[in-house]
Amino acid sequence: MDTAAFDASSLIADVDEVEVEIINPLTKKKTGLFITVLSRDSDTYKSVAKQQGNQRFKSFGRKTSSPGLTVEELEEESLQLLTACTKSWRNMIYKGQEMEFNPANVRVIYENVPTIREQVDDAIHDRGNFKKR
């Protein structure tokens, strides 16, 4: 195997966003619900993550030991990242109502439908999703 011919730039994402179809975890079938997301390498993701990190450092101040983060704080940071990286959706019905796409509704879905939240999180963090095949 000739590894000298490998070009590392081939690992860089080809696209900034991808549309993911949500799978029903019980039936393993496609649902027709589509959510468009940005990758963890996007400027949006990086910006929110940096803001969160900077906020943590500010809250620690000059203390020699960190007070740590609570589970609730970590969950909130995760929700902020997922919401910021969710660009649109199609066919979102929740409790019999079509859900307009906006940040507040994105949070409602991610807070109340763990399987959607998990699939979106997985999609955002899977760099392979952002490469053309």
Image: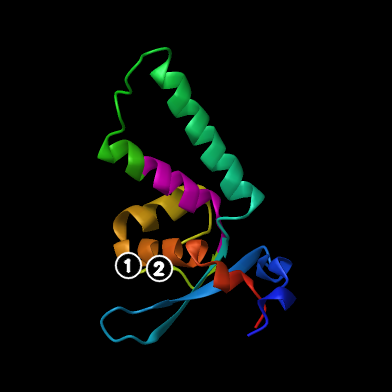
Q: Cα distance, mark 1 to mark 2?
A: 6 Å
| Residue occupying the point 30% across, 78% down | 25
Give the x, y percent position of residue 59.
41, 20
Considering only vertical position in the picture, is 53 above or below 65?
below
| Residue occupying the point 55% across, 41% down | 48
In what quadrant of the picture does the C terminus appear?
bottom right
Looking at the picture, tell me which residue is in the foreground, 1 or 81: 1
CB under 8 Å between discs 1 and 2: yes
Question: Which mark is on residue 115?
Answer: 1
Residue 17 shown in magenta: no
Where are the magenta residues, as a range?
76-88
Looking at the picture, tell me which residue is in the foreground, 35 or 5: 5
Is residue 106 left or right of 71 when viewed as pictured?
right
Label 1: how many residues lie within 10 Å, few (<14), some (14-19) or many (20+)? some
Which residue in the protein does label 2 denote? 119
Give the x, y percent position of residue 45.
57, 49
| Residue occupying the point 31% across, 62% down | 113
Looking at the picture, tell me which residue is in the foreground, 62 or 77: 62
Secondary structure, magenta segment, majority class: helix
| Residue occupying the point 73% across, 71% down | 7
Give the x, y percent position of residue 71.
26, 40
Considering only vertical position in the picture, is 97 above or below 132?
above
Residue 78 shown in magenta: yes
